[in-house]
Image: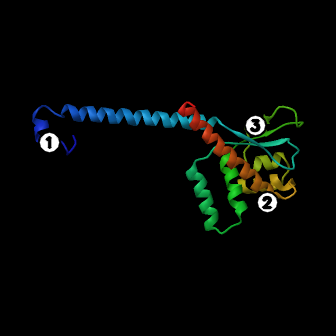
Amino acid sequence: MSEHLTDEALVNGGVDDDFEIASAIEAADANVLGALKRARARVAEQQTYDLAVPGWRDLLVLRLGPISGTQQQRIIDRATRRSSAPSSADTDLLVAAFREVLGRATPTSELAVLVDADGDPVGLDERLANLLDLGPVHSAREVVHVLFAGANSPPAAIQAASGEWVEWARSADDEVNEGFLGE
């Protein structure tokens, strides 16, 4: 029992009715808010952005999804603390937003998830680098850099891709908000 209960409430058989009602309302509000937040997160997570990787003639696509504002801020703060080039944050945003790698035989054919020899989807990892003969890589960041190496200016292409994703993420977030507001 709460230490805020009076002796009178205890003598009269326990918690007074007002306290019980307030506790029930508080619990219901918490459950409703939690359910709404979980539903919104599920809807947001289902949204994706397909980014055609420059230099691959629309044959290679990275499917990206939303990341939290907190995660975005951590990436930017980490890049700032390292005093590294802005492309570091851009690359890290793409890595964090990554969902899957897609490919196709021609620019107009259907996209398919790229898989390894076992049929498992590849990520921004050594398996993808091996499939595409990109050479040795040691991190997802390196994979992004070698994927964009075929662009006219790889750092500019990574920055542009990150900017496109950020714009998409903002508009996707607005769409989710509008959907939950009923507009």
- Secondary element type, mark 2: helix
Mark 2 to mark 1 CA distance (whole Å):
67 Å
140 up-or-down from 52: above or below: below
In three-dimensional space, the C-alpha distance between marks 2 and 3, rounded to whole angstroms, equals: 33 Å
Residue at mark 1:
6
Closer to the camera in the image, 118 or 81: 81
Is residue 139 visible in the rendered image? The answer is: no
Residue 118 is tagged as 3
Measured as percent of width and height from the top left, residue 58 is found at 85, 42
Question: As rendered, which of 160 and 175 lies closer to the eye?
Answer: 175
Number of the front mark, 1 or 3: 1
Left or right: where does residue 18 sit relative to residue 181? Answer: left
Q: Residue at x 67, y 47 (%)?
A: 97
Q: Position of residue 78 (x, y in %)?
A: 61, 62
Q: Which residue is mark 2?
A: 155
Residue 94's x, y, as percent? Answer: 70, 51
Q: Earlier in the sequence, mark 2 or mark 3?
A: 3
The three-letter code of the residue at mark 1 reads Thr
Can residue 111 be seen? yes
In terms of image quadrants, where is residue 12? Answer: top left
Q: Sequence order check: which comes first, mark 1 or mark 3?
A: 1
- Disc 1 to disc 3: CB gap under 8 Å: no
Closer to the chain start, of discs 2 and 1, is 1
Rendered residue at 14%/42% (across/down):
6
Q: Amino acid at mark 3?
A: Asp
Callout 2–callout 3 Cβ contact below 8 Å: no
Q: Amino acid at mark 2?
A: Pro
